[in-house]
Amino acid sequence: MVNIEHIQYVNATASQVYQALTTEAGLAAIWTQELVFTAEVDAINEFRFGDETPTKMQITKLTPNQGMSWLCVNSDPEWIGTSVHFQLHETGGKTSVTLRHTDWRELTDFYRFCNYNWAIFLLSLKEYCEAGTGINYQVRKF
Amino acid sequence: MVNIEHIQYVNATASQVYQALTTEAGLAAIWTQELVFTAEVDAINEFRFGDETPTKMQITKLTPNQGMSWLCVNSDPEWIGTSVHFQLHETGGKTSVTLRHTDWRELTDFYRFCNYNWAIFLLSLKEYCEAGTGINYQVRKF
């Protein structure tokens, strides 16, 4: 198995970062405006990126102000069965966000591109929490 | 050993991307203004980021318009002995940049932060090649 592993630091409280990651408004600003999201364990949430297969993520863990885990139940075939984990840790008003996308079956160019894109997701999260505007799919330049 | 693996797509020719990656002006705009860089195999180049230990990278491979490899000979202890490989591939005026930072001894939070930061390096490279302005250390917000 191959994993994607990032850490990024946001100048905001864990509560602010958690709000951004676990609300429809937050994820719309950070990731994609085309989404359905409910912050409940077992909820299957949906994220759309243009014409790509919709990405469906089941929430498997939700711990207020500490983190969230998703199991991918539909998306690109390379994503199905993988998990995404967000872990927050606040120290003095600054919050580290550890993002792990685990259980990839192979290291492919799609893995490499998703590794790049998860970093952009974290940059978007940082800009949204610190300045109010994210860099979602709809505004990104590819 | 643990590796960092990214791919990113730039709307520019391989020659333009290669120029950005192998000139002092390009790397100053993309990575850091405080640098010494000569595009020659065996040259030990230096990159400074504020008060951090200067990063010294020896060029081990240089193939015009196709790629470059570096061996880290000084930097944070976790980087010493690791290698960074850039590989370019142009298709129809668009160039893929594969970035591999290989031979990490451990998966640490520093690995995770560098994984994030290499993506920002690639974003900076893309913006520099496509719009003329990179996001180097001197303009980044941490």
Image (tube, coloured by chain):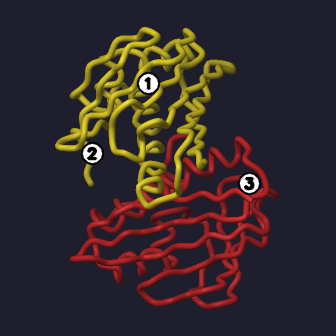
Chain colours: A yellow, B red
Structural distance between the alpha carbons of marks 3 and 2: 32 Å
Label 2 neighbour load within 10 Å: few <14, some 14-19, many 20+: few
Element at label 3? loop
The disc label shown at residue B1, or none: none
**Mark 3 belongs to chain:** B
Which residue is label 2 attached to? A140
In front: label 3 or label 2: 2
As shown in the figure, which amino acid type bears the numbered disc 3? Answer: Glu
Structural distance between the alpha carbons of marks 2 and 1: 18 Å
In front: label 2 or label 1: 2
Q: Are marks 1 and 3 on the same chain?
A: no
Picture residue at 62% right of the left edge, 51% below the top: B114
Q: Are marks 3 and 2 on the same chain?
A: no
Which residue is label 1 attached to? A129
In the displayed structure image, the side of residue B109 where residue B97 appears, left or right:
left
As shown in the figure, which amino acid type bears the numbered disc 2? Answer: Arg
Q: Quadrant of residue B7?
A: bottom left
Closer to the N terminus: mark 2 or mark 1? 1
Asked if the residue at tag 3 contacts the one at tag 1, i.e. Cβ–Cβ closer than 8 Å, the answer is no
**Mark 1 belongs to chain:** A
Element at label 1? helix
Which residue is label 3 attached to? B52
Q: Nearer the viewer, residue B105 or A11?
A: B105
